[in-house]
Structure formats: structure tokens, C-alpha cells
Image (cartoon, rainbow, N blue to C red):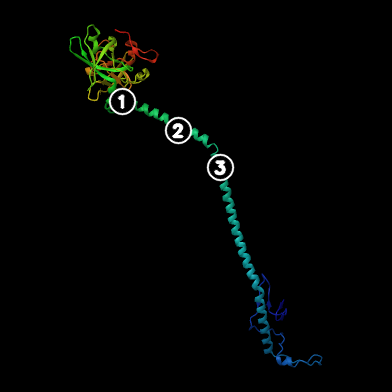
Amino acid sequence: MTDQDGPVPADESASVVHHDATVQVAPLDAPLPPDAPEAPTASSAAELPAAGAPSAAAPRPSGRQRRSEWRRSEKARRYAARNSVRFPIFTRSVLLWMLIFALVGVAFGASGAFWWAHFNTEINQLRTDTQDFETRSQSASADIDKQKTDAEAEINNALKPLKGFLTETQTIQLSQVFAPSVYTVVTLDDQGRPSVGTAFSVVTSGNETLLLTSYSTVRAATVNPGPGINLRKNGTADIPASLVSWDPDHDMAVLRVAKGNIPVLDWAADDVLSQSLASRVFPVSGTGGNGATLTSGTLIDQSQAGFQHTAPLGNDFQGGPIVNADGKVLGMASLTYSPLGYDNGEIHFSPPVSAACSKVLNCGSGTRTAGTPGG
């Protein structure tokens, strides 16, 4: 090893190891080894012979001089040692921090790569799951609609026995809906006493209308000469009517008036009547401030001959329509229809409205016309 002050003796008590070596330096006040030579002094140096002069024996330096010289050389070696190891320590620190930053970067890179791969996996799975989304959504929509329809049908079936009760008040309050189609029938009976009932429109055109009513109400007019028949509506003039056809067995008769465009009520199909057992029914009269009046009852029996119901009937109701909660005509109200051959008192029979087509009307080809005159 070299130093800026000169070479460093190998036998001195100091060692310098670059980079990872350890520097050992003896303290300044350490005792000199016994065999250490005395350092030359300034006086002894002056006594040295000049170059080319004959040499003479140099005086031996004193112990004090040798110790002083050793301290100076040791101090120089320590300074050189410190300067020699400063740069390697700094270099190791930089390398350590670079290693730390490199490891952190690798960790972040690995984490980012992992999450990016996971993200791509999720995206691919999402694409796979939504590839047939439209088809599955249409199928799901169809299933939902079917479930909705089935649920509605189930609820309607469950509420069917209560439907009439739930809509009874509403139906009765809608008497004005039926008012344009029903009229009060005013005539005389066989004894010349007033006879009243109700008639409702079954066929209409631009200039005339056919109405169905009770045979019992207009029975006196079936003979000639007979009493006149008039249709009356609250607040309007009477409309003369003529008797066209009748059927005493079913208590049905058809009237014709010279007035067109009287609304015709819808008739219920035969299968509707067959499924109406225990449902609510509403007889309609042509009297009342709204032009119609309704009562209500329960359909308690049904057969080909007609049906029985518990709705109360007055004379003005006979011949009027009996409707269900949907406003469809099921039959005609009657006080005298007795298919069993006896009077049932307050439990009335009603002929089905479809019987009119075979008894007092012609209903071929989906149209209705007047039946054969007479009974």
C-alpha cells in the first residue's frame, strides 16, 4: 500500500483493507515495540555527510525522537486509511438502495401482472356469460310472462266465488251503463189492470229495434183486439210497440219499436253460464231515476232449462236482463217461469237468454231477426 507521504512499512501496527476489509489502527499513545528503531532527528540529519563525502557513524536518535516520528507516521497512515475506505462505503449504500428499489419495483410489477391477468380472466368470463344474453333474456321474458299469466289465472280462479261480492256495489252503481238498453213496458192485463215489466234491446238497426220481454207482461196483447203496448223511459215520451212473437213456456216475447240504434247488451256464451254456479247475478229493471235499477243475488243452480237465483224481483223487473259481474246477459228475469211445474216462491227460475234464439228469434249465421209471428 502507498500513501501520499510515502510508503507504509509492512511491519507497522496498521492495516487497511479496501471495500469489505477492516482497518485496524493503533492508538497514538501506544508504546513502541522494544526493537523499534529510533526516528532520526533534525540535528542528526544535519550531521549526515554530504553526497560523496566519506561516511561517518550517525548518532542514534533518542527514544523521544523515535516515538515522535512514529506518531507522525501513524497519524499519516490513519488519514490515508480513512480516505481509502470512504468511497467504497458510499458505493455499498447506493447499491443497497438500488437493490431495495429494484425489489420494490419487481414486487409492484408482479402484483400488477397478477391483477391484470385476473382482470382479463374476469373480462373473458363476463364475455362468455353474456355471449347469449339476448337469447337468454328473451327466454326469461317469455318465462316471466307465462308465470304472470299463470299467476293471474290462479288468482282469478281463487277469487271467482268472491268476484260478484267484490263488484256488487260497483255494478249496481253503474246502472246508467245499462239504462240506454232497457225500457219499462206499460200495458194492461186480461182484467184491464196495469201490467208493467221491462224489455231490453236484442236487435237494432237504423230505424227499428227488437226487444225481448216477459210474455206474462204482454199476455193480454196476444189476442185481437188487445191492449196497446208502450215503452217508457224516465223523462221521455212513450214509444208505441207491437208484439211480434212469443213463447208462453219460456215466458218470452219480442216487441218491435220504430226507433233505431238502441244499444244491444252483450250475451254471455253458454259455457260462461255453465261455469257461473255460486256467482253473483244482477237483474236489471227499466225504472229508476238513472233509467235503470239493479238488484243482486246468487246463482244457486244451473241446468239446460235455465238457472235459479236468489235476487229479489218486483213486477217491473220481469222481462229484464239478468247480467253477471262482467255485464254479460245470462238470462231473462221472470216471475212465472216454472220448468219444474210448480212455483218456487222467492227462489226464481230464469230462462237462459240463448233460449230466445230457438223460441222467439232467428239467430242463424250470427245475426238475429224476428221469429215467426205468434206463439
Which residue is pictured at 45% across the width and 33% down the height?
144
Q: Position of residue 74 (x, y in %)?
A: 67, 81
In the image, is residue 235 above or below residue 104?
Answer: above
For residue 309, which quarter of the picture? top left
In depth, the one of 319 and 118 nearer the eye is 319
Which numbered disc flags the more N-terminal residue, 1 or 2?
A: 2
Q: Separation of disc 3 and disc 1 at Cα?
A: 55 Å
Whether residue 198 is visible here, answered yes or no, is yes
State the residue position of label 3.
125
Q: Residues within 10 Å of mark 1 (few under 14, many from 20)?
A: many
Contact between labelled residues 1 and 3, with CB atoms less than 8 Å apart: no
State the residue position of label 2.
144
Which numbered disc flags the more N-terminal residue, 2 or 3?
A: 3
In depth, the one of 54 and 167 nearer the eye is 167
Identify the amino acid type marked 1: Gly
In the image, is residue 249 above or below residue 238?
Answer: above
Q: Residue furthest front?
A: 207
**In the rendered view of the protein, which quadrant contains the C terminus?**
top left
In depth, the one of 107 and 313 nearer the eye is 313
Residue 164 numbered mark, or none: 1
Identify the amino acid type marked 3: Gln
Secondary structure category for the residue under label 3: helix
For residue 366, which quarter of the picture? top left
Viewed as shown, does residue 331 lie left or right of 66? left
Identify the amino acid type marked 2: Ile
Which residue is pictured at 60% across the width and 61% down the height?
101
**In the rendered view of the protein, which quadrant contains the N terminus?**
bottom right
Q: Separation of disc 1 and disc 2 at Cα?
A: 29 Å
